[in-house]
Image (tube, rainbow, N blue to C red):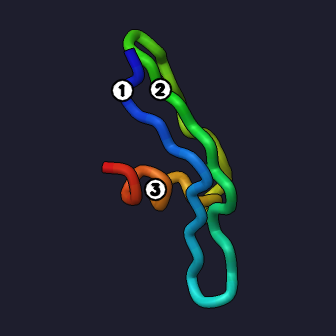
Amino acid sequence: MILLQVNQLTKRFGAEAILENIQLEIKTNDRIALVGKNGAGKSTLIKNNC
């Protein structure tokens, strides 16, 4: 079963694209981790989908 599906997500702050063309699918029993540098858009991705 698919719990979360994201297709073609783009988030911009002004003219700067923070997230661009994001595709994501999380299924039951999947384990995920968001890893990246500070300012890479990890929190922005979560906030836009919860």
Residue tagged 3:
43
Camera-side mark, 3 or 1: 1
Left of 8 or right of it: where is 50?
Answer: left
Who is closer to the viewer here, 38 or 23?
23
Residue at image position (51%, 44%) is 6
Local packing at callout 2 (Cα closer than 10 Å; few below 14, some 14-19, many 20+) is some
Give the x, y percent position of residue 33. Answer: 53, 30
Residue tagged 1:
3
Residue tagged 2:
26
> What's the distance in space between the residues labelled 3 and 1, CA to CA?
19 Å
Give the x, y percent position of residue 24. Answer: 57, 37
Q: Amino acid at mark 2?
A: Ile
Q: With respect to residue 2, does 24 lie above or below? A: below
Give the x, y percent position of residue 43. Answer: 46, 56
Q: Amino acid at mark 3?
A: Ser
Determine which quarter of the picture holds residue 39.
bottom right
Q: Are marks 2 and 1 in contact (CB under 8 Å)?
A: yes
Camera-side mark, 3 or 2: 2
> What's the distance in space between the residues labelled 2 and 1, CA to CA?
6 Å
Residue at image position (37%, 57%) is 47
Farthest residue, direction left: 50
Local packing at callout 1 (Cα closer than 10 Å; few below 14, some 14-19, many 20+) is few
Q: Earlier in the sequence, mark 2 or mark 1?
A: 1
